Image: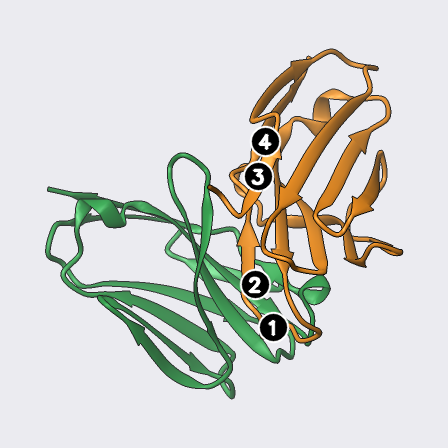
Amino acid sequence: DADVTQTPRNRITKTGKRIMLECSQTKGHDRMYWYRQDPGLGLRLIYYSFDVKDINKGEISDGYSVSRQAQAKFSLSLESAIPNQTALYFCATSGGASGYNEQFFGPGTRLTVL
Amino acid sequence: KNEVEQSPQNLTAQEGEFITINCSYSVGISALHWLQQHPGGGIVSLFMLSSGKKKHGRLIATINIQEKHSSLHITASHPRDSAVYICAVGGTSYDKVIFGPGTSLSVIP
């Protein structure tokens, strides 16, 4: 079984709809991240959480919100989706307090907003 | 100017060729990462290094901290190496990591 899972894998929605992307991990890591990837651009950090009670904005948090329901679950919400939020979204985890620990990525969610 | 740049942007090679992908960065870092993204989208970490050189199978990663430059080499390339290779530079925590735009590699039989 995959260590980091994302649901759904693909989603097409309409402008103005509320969307939730879910991430679960079995690695026992405290740290979880949400990124978006756009063609020609590097991964950009949306939100991150270093433990259940810790939520932090990343580089591009506007239009997004997150919930850390448990150590293993980190959800990303688009309150009112807009077309420029069409992208590939990745969840990732890492362990420990040092950035020297490897990051593990989920398979990605392809979101299209019409 | 982007903080992390990669070259080339796209690369096509014949099977068996030696491949080099370059990464240059403009910020101070504690670690540099190389990742591989397969056509299906999945991302896998290949290397994390802060100095010198690391080798894993046919992959070799080097870093020159003074020149703010890293290279990823693939020896005896194979079609299964076809992927996007991403360089990322970081501080002491992943919330400070900056990702490059990636290099798309296609290895032709």
Q: Nearer the viewer, residue A90 or B2?
A: A90
Residue type, label 3: Thr
Earlier along the polypeptide chain: callout 4 or callout 3?
3
Q: What is the C-alpha distance between the residues marked 2 and 1?
A: 7 Å
Q: What is the C-alpha distance between the residues marked 4 and 3?
A: 10 Å
Tags 4 and 1 touching, CB below 8 Å: no
On the image, the x and y values in percent for residue B4 come to 56, 63
Dot 1: chain letter: B
The chain displayed green equals: B
Q: Which mark is residue A5?
A: 3
Residue type, label 4: Thr
- Classify 10 Å Cα crowding around label 2: few (below 14), some (14-19), many (20 and above): many
Residue that extends furthest to the right in the rendered view of this protein: A53
Tags 2 and 1 touching, CB below 8 Å: yes
From the viewer's perspective, is B4 left or right of B12? right
- Shown colour of chain A: orange
Q: Nearer the viewer, mark 2 or mark 3?
A: 3
On the image, the x and y values in percent for residue B75 come to 18, 65
Dot 3: chain letter: A
Q: Which mark is residue A109?
A: 4
Asked whether residue A75 is in view, the answer is: yes
Tags 2 and 3 touching, CB below 8 Å: no
| Residue labelled with disc 1 | B26
- Classify 10 Å Cα crowding around label 4: few (below 14), some (14-19), many (20 and above): many
Q: Nearer the viewer, mark 3 or mark 1?
A: 3
Q: Nearer the viewer, mark 4 or mark 1?
A: 4
Q: Which mark is residue B4?
A: 2
